[in-house]
Image (cartoon, helix red, strand yellow):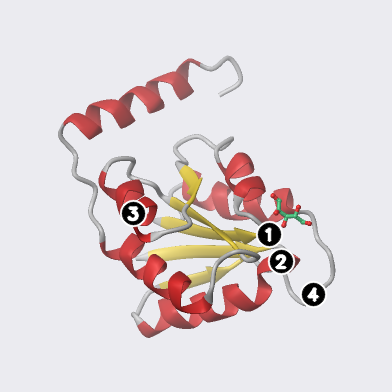
Amino acid sequence: MRIAVGSDHRGVAMRAKIVDLLKSRGLEVIDEGCNGQESVDYPDIAAAVARKVSKGEVDRGILICGTGLGMSIVANKFPGVRAAPCHDYVTAEMSRRHNNLNVLCLSGDILGERLVDRLVEIWLDTEFEGGRHERRVGKITALERNMPNA
Ligand code: RB5
């Protein structure tokens, strides 16, 4: 699996740990920054990761900002991207089983280290259930295709 990761200044330390975790699992990681602790604008990082997912250059993405909210708002502007903040094991699991989430958004401010490691593992290991959820996700794709600017 190829996975792109990115964070703004609120998620630098968490991103470094997640990159280590992903590499330890043998995944190919494309790191889109940011570098250092200087303040950056989360839309720039979210766009870099989401564009790669949207174009099929990577299989999935992980984005971290203070809350995970700004990153998900931006990432969902890209066709084919399904992004959401997950703060607990249930949302991490169900985001895969029911929503086929391909961009995981995390909060650098709220989540603890152990929680985030397990949350990422659950998100990586959980398969999309398909079936009725395939139909529902298909409707999201159809809506996207009908958007005037899509
Ligand atoms: C940056 O201060 C903060 O707004 C950003 O990290 C994120 O939480 C936005 O949603």
Name the quarter where the N terminus is drawn: bottom left
Q: Which residue is mark 4?
A: 37
The vertical placement of 82 against 120, above or below, is above
Task: Tell me whether circle 1 and circle 2 mark residues in contact (CB < 8 Å).
Answer: yes
Q: Which residue is mark 3?
A: 90
Q: Nearer the viewer, residue 118 or 141?
A: 118
Mark 4 and mark 1: Cα distance apart in space: 13 Å
> For the residue marked with disc 2, what is the amino acid?
Arg
Res 82 quadrant in image = top left
Pointer 2 residue Cβ closer than 8 Å to ligand 1? yes
Q: Which residue is mark 1?
A: 66
Identify the mark nearer the N-term, 4 or 3.
Answer: 4
Res 90 quadrant in image = bottom left
Identify the mark nearer the N-term, 4 or 1.
Answer: 4
Pointer 1 residue Cβ closer than 8 Å to ligand 1? yes
> For the residue marked with disc 3, what is the amino acid?
Val
Identified at 61% across, 20% down, the residue is 149
Q: Which residue is mark 2?
A: 10
The vertical placement of 79 against 62, above or below, is above
Secondary element at tag 4: loop
Q: Nearer the viewer, residue 143 or 86?
A: 86
Mark 1 and mark 3: Cα distance apart in space: 21 Å
Secondary element at tag 3: helix
